[in-house]
Image (cartoon, rainbow, N blue to C red):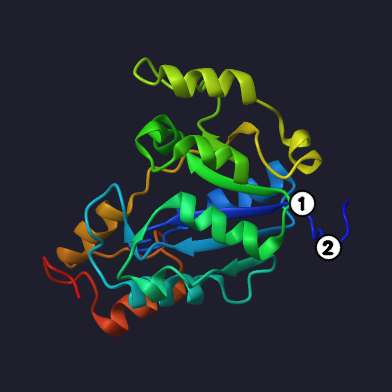
Amino acid sequence: MPDGDSGILGLFGGTFDPLHVAHLRLGLEAREALALAELCFIPAGRPALRDAPRCSAAHRLAMVQRALAGMPGCSVDAAEAEDATHTSYTIDTLERQRRRHGPLRPLVLLLGADAFARLEAWQRWRELFDLAHIAVATRPGHEMRAGADGAALDAEFKARRGIAADLAGAPAGRIVPFAITPLEISASAIRDRLGRGASVRYLVPDPVLDYIETHQIYRTPHGH
């Protein structure tokens, strides 16, 4: 590998409102399937294409940090959560990561299939491929495609589609689908359960549950 390269770095951004076990499972399976040397979780400050998070960026960042404490090969980038006054665009995230890690290290942006299908709505979406590979988590046995409304994205997918073994050979530019264990867990359902006073144990990591209970997050319709 080039000098200064520390292996393939996975980048996993999200609202994490709250972080739950399906997030951790996706990260673990991505590390295995894609041979990632490291996985960096990036909590968004103000996400661009979704409703405002239910709880503050500071709380969401703290939950991610607690969940990942002691997990080898995982790190947290706090920059966006600590500057929640600006909208979080993935292109800005990747530009910042590229400046940090240099032009040669392979960077891999992890996306779910639903998010990838909407990629054409993202800010400067074509430039993402200049900065990182994109790995798309799919259900086992499901053939991934961009969708009928995403002709431009479908063309990019056909031209850039690769396999995990391709990722180490270039810093950016490939689209690699990988299958993950399907877990029907959503942050919105977790928030709903907490709002009703129901248990979310085993849906979120214990450190996250402890934090939620300590700070009484999501216990009311408007959260904290």
Residue type pointed to by label 1: Leu
Q: Residue tagged by mark 1?
A: 104
- Along the line of sight, which residue is nearer the eye, 163 or 107? 107
- Circles 1 and 2, Cβ within 8 Å, touching? The answer is yes
Instruction: State left or right for residue 214 relative to residue 223.
Output: right
Count of labels in the image = 2
Vertical position of residue 40 compared to residue 120: above or below: below
Question: Mark 1 and mark 2: span between their CA atoms?
Answer: 8 Å
How crowded pointer 1 is (Cα within 10 Å; few <14, some 14-19, many 20+) is rated as some
Q: Which quarter of the figure has residue 181?
A: top right
Vertical position of residue 125 compared to residue 203: above or below: above
Query: Which residue is outermost to the left?
Result: 221
Q: Residue at x 70, y 43 (%)?
A: 34
Residue 98 shows in the view: yes
Q: Residue at x 38, y 79 (%)?
A: 210
Q: Which quarter of the figure has residue 63?
A: bottom left
Residue 87 position, x and y percent, is: 32, 60
- Residue 115: give its label: none
- State which quarter of the image contains the C terminus: bottom left
Q: Residue tagged by mark 2?
A: 4
- Along the line of sight, which residue is nearer the eye, 93 or 111? 93
Q: Which quarter of the figure has residue 61?
A: bottom left
